[in-house]
Image (cartoon, rainbow, N blue to C red):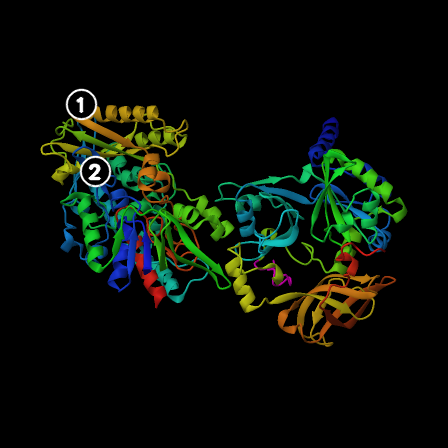
């Protein structure tokens, strides 16, 4: 029987990245993907004949180091695609537009004062984002038993903060965990601008502008990307990234099996303790390895694949209590032609429907109590503009993240409830693009429950677990499993549920590979 | 003035809900408690002693006596995953525990610190009863997280239970008409139709906390008083008597059994780091089975076993006859190097020795152990330093406790 150095469970971007790093160091690596396609939530699939889309529809902070280390450019990934314009839509056509990126962004639709404030605001946040940037690609120190190297990470962070200077250091401490609303209110007047800028700290989470709990920290995380938080769509779309990762993996010697659903991680217990020995597939096939690295979310990894019987009680309890219910639904529309958005000439930007922060807050209120938002807020992209292969010639795909749609609907996610949500979302879209209905050939809305079922992600959560302060850094997903290794020797985590978190970034896969290689020495 | 009186009245009313519960045997047992010597156990009114602790102790050792274990916590663990869930909870391997068998075990935190000890009864294929001295429902429910088919139910109030211990206990049960009881082996369970009625089930386990021959009787609360009456009728000529906590404490020290709050500090109630214990510290290493599938605290316990615990619980025979309550232990008569402390101590009438349980730093166990004893002689404080000898076997372990059928007394 084949014996692998490492078996990776999950062929999403983190699994592929981890696998490739390991294979490049000479390990014999097998990636097991339950679906027929690689890419996880970034996998492109045909949702209607001839029309394709991926759940993740833009890139904001994919790691430049990973792209370079794995030479993804050589495999067709365009890391330098231009940033997208961010547009806060207004139903009267009075849009607020942020064009370009960073300090050179051009704002329109806002006062001169807000334009000036934006530069200051962005520069301050950029300093903070730069401070944190090295730590996203580092293993966080272990609580309780830090090695010298781990302690140095604390020292490094402390030094970096100190080097900000007294004022900025104070501001950093104050701002990092501030509710988004407070930060926006103290900087800007324009309601649409405030909603647009707070959006990136909130999207994907169970939080709204008034929520305390590090929404700004997660904004800073996303600002670690090439365009300081601005999104981009590479030529060839998200698919080009996944294809490049796949090619890089195969070239490095990684063996990949799709349609290979893991049933159990095999654990051996004897007088010397526990150890993972490999995996058992749904088909009953046993595969052996020295290490298993799971890119699957922590809850599924531990509760379903390892099983409580192989874990400690309090640890299991913490895993069971992880906050990982998704609140974002995904809308895919097959369009016969581009719709006309009132007052907008070009649709190649990233359009946000949330006219003010309270629109987001009220939408969240409904979801908190188990109902889909009466007035949903959303982020819209037409990915077929960047990748024409997604739709038949001349036709298009509209992709939207719709917030807030709870994983658990209080009456259950019936077909009626989904149809009602779909209609409500289309109605909302129609007040910005009045001709949208006549362009729709087909459409689907995927609730977090659908995402869970189709993509094997607990709660349908983008990040495999909330990016909230209780589940970040050395607490992600929980202490005793936050350094990629786990209480079970030989078992590692390498997915979005680990530090630094999700989004198409690659940090967990990169960091986990480091830890696996370090343990081997 | 009026208001004040009202408020006083209300103050008393506020305690209404906090009155101690009485056990299912209270209507009978309270008649023996002529001095109203009540204490409390898990919210129940519970006898410290009934008539005279010494007398009750001698009943346990020389004839037979009953101990009301209604306040002891009892949990049913049921469902297809009951065995797997339990086996991960406790440090012993219970996968081979047969139906109608009982075993003694303990359970620990993730860090291998002992939460409590108790017994588990396998009642049927997928039904176990776990007993513990203190409430543990929150921990057990937590321990059930991640299993598909297991239910933890607190049945403490729903079972009337009476420990019946002493050298004549088997004879009394026989006299009660429980045919075949003499064939019940230690840690086995038998079921009897109570008073010949097959609808009324009396369950008897050969278990106890006195180190002597003894049984525990389990019955539906509706039958509790009848059971008491039957037993006391049969035991009339065998000197049957209820015993309270004080007498129990004497018996269990002689048997070498540990008590929470005395030998160990329940881990979930321990505030200071490592002021709780591991099974290895408590000399319960034999309860920890590293050959079994995973169990809670495994990694920490393996380390504790490998490194060796700092302290180890030992049984001591102490020179003289002065009880070494709360004594410090030293490695020489000079009392310079403090190596441990006494946890429980008594003058044992059956062993005729000054015995104790003590925590001693492991590396000093093989050397000299001296106890610094403070005592009072007609209210004058006195001190003496005496030598202690480590005893490896229980102080009191008569052959009849293990023999089946039990030897006649």
Tell which subunit mark 2 falls on.
A
Q: Position of residue B214 (x, y in %)?
A: 77, 51
Mark 1, other Cα within 10 Å: few <14 / some 14–19 / many ≥20: some
Please give the name of the residue rendered at 71% of the width and 36% of the height, measured from the top-left corner: B220
Q: Position of residue B141 (x, y in %)?
A: 55, 43
Tell me the CA gap for discs 1 and 2.
23 Å
Q: Is residue A412 left or right of residue A379?
A: right
Task: Magenta stretch: give its range.
Answer: B273-284
Is residue B278 inside the magenta stretch? Answer: yes
Q: Quadrant of the N terminus of chain B?
A: top right
Under circle 2, the secondary element is strand
Q: Is residue B11 above or below residue B162?
A: above
Q: In this figure, which residue is indicated by the disc labeled 2?
A: A53
Q: Position of residue A58 (x, y in %)?
A: 21, 42
Please give the name of the residue rendered at 47% of the width and 49% of the height, measured from the top-left corner: A308
Please give the name of the residue rendered at 68% of the width and 38% of the height, measured from the top-left corner: B157
Q: Quadrant of residue B371?
A: bottom right
Q: Quadrant of the C terminus of chain B?
A: bottom right
Depth check: A475 or A426 in front? A426
Q: Quadrant of residue A113?
A: top left
Q: In this figure, which residue is indicated by the disc labeled 1?
A: A434
User: What label does residue A270 carry, if any?
Assistant: none
Is residue B391 inside the magenta stretch? Answer: no
Q: Are marks 1 and 2 in contact (CB under 8 Å)?
A: no
Q: Are marks 1 and 2 on the same chain?
A: yes
Q: Quadrant of residue B232?
A: top right
Q: Position of residue B160 (x, y in %)?
A: 72, 39
Q: Which mark sits nearer the N-terminus, 1 or 2? A: 2
């Amino acid at each position: 029987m084949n014996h692998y150095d490492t078996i990776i469970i999950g062929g999403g971007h983190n699994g592929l990245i981890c696998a490739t790093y390991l294979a490049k160091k000479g390990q014999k690596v097998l990636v097991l993907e339950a679906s027929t396609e690689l890419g996880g939530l970034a996998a492109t699939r045909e949702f209607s004949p001839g029309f394709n889309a991926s759940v993740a529809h833009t890139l904001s902070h994919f790691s430049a180091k990973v792209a370079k280390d794995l030479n993804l450019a050589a495999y067709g990934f365009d890391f330098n695609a231009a940033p997208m314009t961010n547009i806060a839509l207004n139903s009267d056509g009075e849009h607020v537009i942020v064009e370009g990126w960073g300090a050179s962004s051009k704002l329109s639709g806002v006062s001169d004062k807000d334009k000036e404030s934006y530069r200051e605001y962005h520069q301050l946040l950029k300093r903070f984002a730069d401070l944190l940037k090295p730590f996203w690609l580092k293993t966080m120190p272990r609580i309780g038993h830090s090695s010298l190297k781990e302690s140095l990470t604390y020292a490094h962070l402390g030094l970096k903060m100190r080097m900000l200077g007294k004022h900025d250091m104070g501001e950093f401490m104050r701002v990092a965990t501030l509710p988004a609303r407070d930060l926006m209110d103290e900087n800007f007047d324009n309601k649409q601008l405030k909603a647009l800028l707070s959006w990136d700290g909130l999207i994907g989470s169970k939080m709204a502008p008034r929520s305390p709990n590090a929404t700004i920290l997660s904004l800073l995380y996303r600002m670690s990307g090439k365009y300081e938080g601005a999104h981009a769509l590479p030529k060839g779309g998200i698919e080009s990234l996944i294809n490049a990762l796949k090619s890089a993996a195969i070239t490095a010697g990684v063996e990949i099996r799709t349609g290979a659903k893991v049933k159990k991680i095999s654990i051996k217990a004897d007088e010397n303790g526990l150890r993972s020995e490999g995996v058992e597939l749904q088909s009953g096939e046993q595969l052996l390895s020295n290490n298993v690295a799971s890119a699957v979310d922590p809850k599924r990894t531990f509760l379903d694949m390892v099983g409580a019987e192989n874990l400690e009680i309090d640890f299991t309890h913490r895993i069971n209590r992880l906050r990982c219910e998704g609140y974002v639904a995904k809308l895919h529309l097959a369009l016969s032609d581009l719709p006309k958005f009132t007052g907008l000439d070009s649709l190649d930007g990233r359009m946000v429907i949330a006219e003010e922060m309270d629109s987001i807050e009220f939408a969240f209120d409904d979801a908190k109590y188990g109902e889909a938002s009466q007035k949903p807020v959303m982020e819209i992209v037409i990915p077929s503009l960047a990748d024409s292969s997604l739709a038949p010639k001349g036709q298009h795909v509209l992709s939207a993240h719709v917030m807030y749609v709870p994983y658990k609907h209080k009456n259950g996610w019936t077909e009626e409830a989904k149809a009602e949500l779909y209609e409500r979302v289309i109605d909302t879209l129609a007040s910005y693009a009045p001709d949208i209905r006549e362009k729709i050939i087909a459409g689907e809305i995927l609730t977090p429950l659908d995402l869970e079922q189709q993509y094997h992600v607990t709660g349908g959560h983008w990040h495999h677990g909330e990016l909230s302060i209780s589940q970040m850094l050395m607490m992600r997903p929980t202490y005793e499993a936050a350094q990629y290794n786990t209480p079970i020797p030989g078992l590692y985590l390498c997915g979005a549920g680990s530090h630094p978190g999700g989004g198409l970034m690659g940090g967990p896969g990169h960091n986990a590979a480091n830890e696996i290689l370090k343990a081997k020495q | 003035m009026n208001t004040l009186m009202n408020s006083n009245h209300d103050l008393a009313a506020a305690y209404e809900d906090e009155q101690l519960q009485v056990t299912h045997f209270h209507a009978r047992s309270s008649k023996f408690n002529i001095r109203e010597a009540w204490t409390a156990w898990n919210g129940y009114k519970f006898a410290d002693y009934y008539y005279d602790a010494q007398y009750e102790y001698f009943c346990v050792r020389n004839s037979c006596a009953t101990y009301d274990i209604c306040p002891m916590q009892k949990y049913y663990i049921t469902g297809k995953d009951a065995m797997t869930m339990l086996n991960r909870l406790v440090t012993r391997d219970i996968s081979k525990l047969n139906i109608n068998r009982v075993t003694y075990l303990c359970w620990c935190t993730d860090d291998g610190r002992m939460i409590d000890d108790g017994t588990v009864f396998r009642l049927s294929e997928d039904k176990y009863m776990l007993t513990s001295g203190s409430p543990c429902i929150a921990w057990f429910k937590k321990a059930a997280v991640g299993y598909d088919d297991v239910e933890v139910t607190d049945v403490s109030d729903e079972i009337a239970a009476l420990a019946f211990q002493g050298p004549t206990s088997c004879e009394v049960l026989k006299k009660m008409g429980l045919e075949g009881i003499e064939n019940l082996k230690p840690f086995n369970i038998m079921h009897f139709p109570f008073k010949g009625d097959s609808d009324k089930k009396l369950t008897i386990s050969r278990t106890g906390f006195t180190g002597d021959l003894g049984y525990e009787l389990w019955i539906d609360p509706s039958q509790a008083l009848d059971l008491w009456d039957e037993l006391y009728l049969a035991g009339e000529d065998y000197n049957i008597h209820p015993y309270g906590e004080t007498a129990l404490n004497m018996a269990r020290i002689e048997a070498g059994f540990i008590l929470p709050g005395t030998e160990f500090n329940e881990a979930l109630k321990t505030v200071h780091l490592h002021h709780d214990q591991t099974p290895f510290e408590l000399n319960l290493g034999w309860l920890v089975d590293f050959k079994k599938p995973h169990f809670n605290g495994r990694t920490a316990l393996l380390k504790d076993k490998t490194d060796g615990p700092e302290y180890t619980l030992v049984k001591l025979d102490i020179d003289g006859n002065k009880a070494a309550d709360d004594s410090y232990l030293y490695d020489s008569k000079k009392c310079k190097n403090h190596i441990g402390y006494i946890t429980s101590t008594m003058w044992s009438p059956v062993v005729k020795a000054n015995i104790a349980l003590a925590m001693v730093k492991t590396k000093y166990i093989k050397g000299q152990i001296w106890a610094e004893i403070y005592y009072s002689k007609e209210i004058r404080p006195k001190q003496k330093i005496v030598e202690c000898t480590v005893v490896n076997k229980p102080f009191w372990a008569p052959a009849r406790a293990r023999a089946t059928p039990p030897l006649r007394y």
